[in-house]
Amino acid sequence: MLGRVALNRKLPPPEVLSGWESAQWIYDSVDGELREEAAAAVAEMPVDWALVPVEGRRKKLLVADMDSTIINVECLDELADFAGIKAEIAAITERAMRGELEFEPALRERVGKLKGLALTALQRTYDERVRLNPGAAAFVKTMAAHGARCVLVSGGFTYFTSRVADEAGFQANRANVLLDDGVALTGEVQEPILGRKAKLDALRAEAAALKINDKDVLAVGDGANDLDMIKAAGLGIAYRAKPLVAAEAGARIDHTNLETALFFQGYRRGEFAS
C-alpha cells in the first residue's frame, strides 16, 4: 500500500520503500472490508494506493498506452492544432476516451478531417508538443532492467510510438499507421485499426510469446479503449483516467506520477533505473 497511513488493525510499522514517499504493509489476507478501510483512511489525502498480492508482485510484461499516459498529450489533437481544428477534433477524442463513441469510427472521422495536412506537422508535433509524463522513463526502464518486456500499445500512430518507445525505453511498439502521399496526409488510416480489442489481443499475444499468464502482466492506460487490457492484467492501473476506466480498474494513479507503478510492485527507490 502506498502512503503513510496506519489502519485500524494491529500491524507492525510499515516497510519504507522511499522515505516520505512510499511505504507498504504486508497483510495475511486481503478482503473487501480491508479495501473499504484503506480507502476510508486515505479518502481526504492526495495519495495513491493499491492492494496487491505479494506473490507474483513484480510483473514480467508491461503493456502501456501512449497518449495521455506515457506522454502528456493526445497526438491527434495536437496535429489538428496545426490544421486549425483542434477544438473540433479534441471534442471527438474526449468522447471516444470516455467510451461515448466507438473508437474505430471516431478515429477514421478525426483522421479524415486532417486530409491535406503537410507531413512536416508530424515532426513539429513531436518536437514541440510531445513530452514524457513524469516518472515514465524510470517506470519503463526499471521494469526492463529487472527483466520485464515493455511494449507500447497505442490507438495513436506509429510515427509517434516509434519515437516515444525509443525515448522511454520500450522494447517494442504497436500502433496505427497514418497514410500519406509523400507530401501530406491522405485523411486515411491503415486498416485494420488498432483499437480496444486489438490492445487486449496485443497483451495476450505478448504474454503467450513469453509463456506467461495474464496475472504476470501490468497494463496501464487512461481511456475507454484501454479498459479491456487493464481489466485482463494481473495489475491493471488507471492513470489519471476517465471516470469509466477509473471506476473499473483494480488500481489507480491520480495524484502521483508513473513511478508509483513501481512502488505498487514493491520496488524501492534505490532500485529505480535512471
Image (cartoon, rainbow, N blue to C red):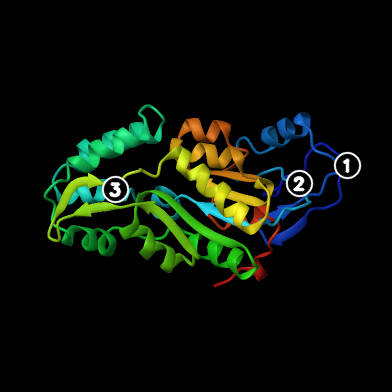
Tags 2 and 1 touching, CB below 8 Å = no
The structure residue drawn at horizontal position 60% and vertical position 57%, both measured from the top left corner, is: 209
Percent position of residue 172, x then y: 47, 62
* 159 relative to 23 in the view: left or right: left
Q: Which mark is residue 190?
A: 3
Q: Amino acid at mark 2?
A: Pro
Instruction: Tell me the residue that label 1 is attached to.
Output: 10
Give the structural element (helix, strand or loop) at label 1: loop
Tags 3 and 2 touching, CB below 8 Å = no
The structure residue drawn at horizontal position 13% and vertical position 55%, both measured from the top left corner, is: 184
Percent position of residue 84, x then y: 13, 45
Percent position of residue 3, x then y: 67, 49
71 lies above or below 86 = below
* 11 relative to 269 in the view: left or right: right
Q: Which mark is residue 53?
A: 2
Q: Which mark is residue 127?
A: none
